Amino acid sequence: MRRVLVTGGCGFIGCNFLRQVVPGRPETEWINLDALTYAGRLENTEDFAGAENYRFVHGAIQDKELVDGLVSEGVDAMVNFAAESHVDRSIAGPEVFTATNVMGTQNLLEAARRHGVESFVQVSTDEVYGSLAPEEPAFTEESRIEPNSPYSASKASADLLCRAYHETYGMPITVTRCSNNYGPYQYPEKLIPSFIRHALADRPVPLYGDGMNVRDWLHVEDHCRAIALVLDRGEPGRIYNVGGDNERTNLEITELILEHLGKSWDLISFVTDRLGHDRRYAIDSARIQTELGWRPEHTFETGIRQTIDWYTENLDWASRVMSEAAG
């Protein structure tokens, strides 16, 4: 049986990935290594936790002995979702982002090198490219990396380590860089679930700056299908951009949420902008579409409505996550 180590599988994107592959690929054993920080929750995996081809291991990717022990059991492939990912948190406390996103990734790479792992997929972000002006073309895989936050700098550093391990040791490593994800099980402090919760409670919806920052939005299930394709057929040493081709300003997203929930736009509250707030992200996904045949299945209009409805129906989940995180 093929064995794949998935790190960070209790987080937003990781749990959605496992939700696809655990039942969909019963011939593969999926090992989920997760530290269960504030953003990773066991309950996110409850619907497949009892599967015969699934195993959970509690631990951090920074733990060299634990990682090496797991990989030495005979891991064929690794998919690294584990990361600190909230930009505001990285501004307030950058150290943990370096420890997890850089040193943790290096631990995984070293274990993969020592034990001859056949495939290593690093899940990264479009934020490593920096910010685009309104008239500039979308980021391609050849775009320069110019990260502007401690978070994106830590992810860019991890990407460069992946490149170095491929070039130096010939390791079969691929990197995916996605645009902003949305969908079920996203940590509630992120933009879309946070704004939904504020609106449902008739509380002011805090919008940074003038609200005109632009993001490309990708449904998490489409992203996970792309990662599975890269795991199966990605060319070692390649970077694959994964975007939704759905550029929207943050103000547009806010208005859409309020409209769907039947709330007044008067709830919008413009607040002091985030430090170093990137103005625009946009992703060109031509490579993964051409080479691997990936296409997004969710239209933004349908996907965002489904997402708003999911958080509306799962308010207890979001409230529980936030209250437990607060201690």
Image: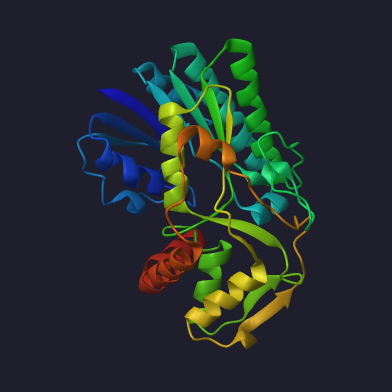
Depth order, front residue of 251/68: 251
Location of residue 9 by image quarter: top left
Q: Give the residue drawn at x 49%, y 52%.
A: 39
Q: Is residue 36 visible?
A: no
- The image shows residue 64, relative to residue 7, as above or below, that is above
| Quadrant (top left, top right, bottom left, bottom right) of the N terminus | top left
Q: How many marks?
A: 0
Q: Residue at x 55, y 41 (%)?
A: 83
Q: How is the image coloured?
A: rainbow
- Taking depth in this image into account, of 142 and 188 the one nearest to the observer is 142
Q: Is residue 321 above or below residue 25?
A: below
State left or right for residue 71 relative to residue 154: left
> What residue is at 68 percent from the left and 36 percent from the top?
156
Query: As drawn, which residue projects farthest toward the front?
Result: 290
Q: Residue at x 72, y 63 (%)?
A: 213
Report x, y in % for residue 87: 66, 53
Position in image of residue 260 (x %, y %): 48, 79
Which of the 4 image quadrants contains residue 167?
A: top right
Where is residue 54 drawn, in percent x and y? Answer: 27, 36
In the rendered image, is residue 312 in sight? yes
Q: Give whichever of 74, 246 is nearer the camera.
A: 246
Residue 8, percent from left and from top: 45, 41
